[in-house]
Amino acid sequence: MDNRRPPLAPAFRSLPEYVHHWAQATPDRRAFTFVDHPAPDSRGVHRTLTWRRLDVRVRAVAARLAEEAEPGARVALLCPQGLEYVTGFLATLAAGLIAVPLYPPGLPGQGDRLTAVLADARPSVVVTTSRHVGEVQELCDRVVAVDQVPDAAARDLEPADAEVAYLQYTSGSTRTPAGVEISHANVVANARQALSAYGADAHPVTCVGWLPLYHDMGLVLSIAAPVVRGLLSVLMDPVAFLHEPARWLRLLAVHPRALSAAPNFAYDYCASAVTDAQKAELRLDGVAALINGSEPVRPGTADRFQAAFAGQGLVAQTHCPSYGLAEATVFVSAARPGEPLRRFALDRDALAQGKALPARPDDPRAVLLAGCGTPAGQQVRIVDPVSGDRLSEGEVGEIQVRGPNVGRGYWNQEEQTRRVFGTDGRLRTGDLGTVLEGQLIVTGRLKDLIVVDGRNHYPQDLEATVQDTHPAIRRDRLAAFGVAGGSGERVVVVAEHTRTTSLAEIDVPALVRAVRAAVSGRHGVRLADVLLVPPGTVPRTSSGKVSRALTRERYLAGVYAADGAA
């Protein structure tokens, strides 16, 4: 029954209207399943809501929220990953309130960000679960526990008049949070764009995800897209994935035409950590698409994952490098499933000068990047970041986006809204990229560029060289950045060592010499400092990416010990 193709839905203005439609059209189909892993050896406990049950729960919680806040008020979602999060988010929208997707207090490394976002959003109500009520009562006077609202509270609600659906806070900074105003029209449009890009508008898929629901990609791919198309969404907790990555692969294996997304580190983590015994029980030939939204996407990540799981039937054409950002709801450009991975070897020196010129893939000075396909129902152009002039194919500049998915601006930040969203409907992404052979190629972040002696250096290139230098350096857990010096910008690298090796076992001076030599030989850059720090020391954003800005800030504040400095 669940494998039937869901009927096409008429166009609705908001996600709750889609929920109500599916509750009437296919009431007994599964809508959302959360797979809990209560113990280290757990194979997963499944909890499911049908579309009928989801509609009842959404209407019940929405009615309760409408009693607590006036239309347009903010509602902070401080729920753990699970069905209550889905219900609370959709209920907030149904009540005509503005959702602020967050997480319960106590998430490691995110306490400062939570405090800053709550201070900026000033929610009238906090939505959580009964388990977390005690923790969140200190944060807001009004608290609604989703699982304590009875079904009997459900009532029919008129479609909300509110234009803003939720505030998507960007993940990069804990001290200066910026909440992107995402309208109901934005999220519905982006869900449709994503469904079309990954072929889910024509063929039924199962959305499988462990990405946090407070993150833009997790929210759109695991809630918005399946709600718009009437698809089953299977969720698990990010912590459960980190404890045992094979759990994610098992869900991909058992659900037909699975569609999922993860950042670079997750694919590398699976390739290195999943055992042969765990692989033996997997069949991955039915996976429809695996999205990688890291910036930039490197072909080596897909190659390592493919090599690790080709024996389980994984098809190489399922890898879909993609590009997006919170200001565009999330999805902007995507490689289509079923097409070979597009690889580009570019000359590093030319790239630093703003030109994407081809190089031999085996040239040690080549930069290997994956194409992120074509725009998903929107316009993308490359412009000079200073003049704003449009650049030709092969020239590197700032990526600009225009489409129905581009948010309205930043919450209560008019000046920043004018600077980033402009007056012509074009979003200045702050990302650098180019177009080659019709493919969007993301090369890095404008604000992260390191300029030494007039030459541009991409930090991710330096980081790739460093992490390949020594086996004790933990992959994707390091940051390269520039700091002001007496004679110009100085380059610093802060890298974690692997969990399997203690600092006492590492010849740190030899490691530092090797890193210096590799970076000097490949990039012509002298490193001012190389610091080797314990696992978990390099800060990450809420989406799991390394925060170079916060690492730089901590370095300048003297937070890191100088054991590995040279």
Image (cartoon, rainbow, N blue to C red):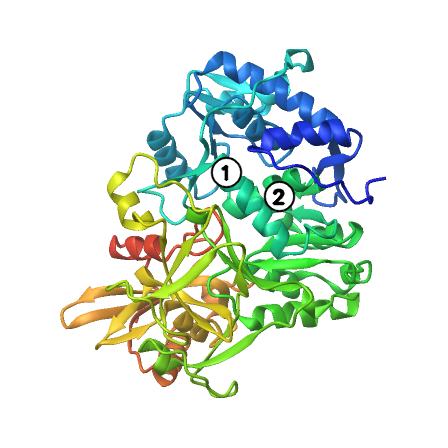
- Name the residue tied to disc 2: 225
- Name the residue tied to disc 1: 185
| Camera sees residue 39 | no
Residue placed most toward the observer, 212 or 156: 156
Badge number at residue 321: none
Left or right relative to 400: residue 199: right
| Camera sees residue 276 | yes
Total labels: the figure holds: 2
Left or right relative to 348: residue 284: right
Task: Give how far apart the Cα atoms at labels 1 and 2 are.
Answer: 13 Å
Q: Nearer the viewer, mark 1 or mark 2?
A: 1
Residue extending furthest toward the left: 486
The amino acid at mark 1 is: Ala
Along the polypeptide, which appears first: circle 1 or circle 2?
A: 1
Image quadrant occupied by the C terminus? bottom left
Q: Residue at x 67, y 56 (%)?
A: 199
Left or right relative to 480: residue 38: right
Residue extending furthest toward the right: 1
The amino acid at mark 2 is: Ala
Residue 412 image point, x, y percent: 30, 34
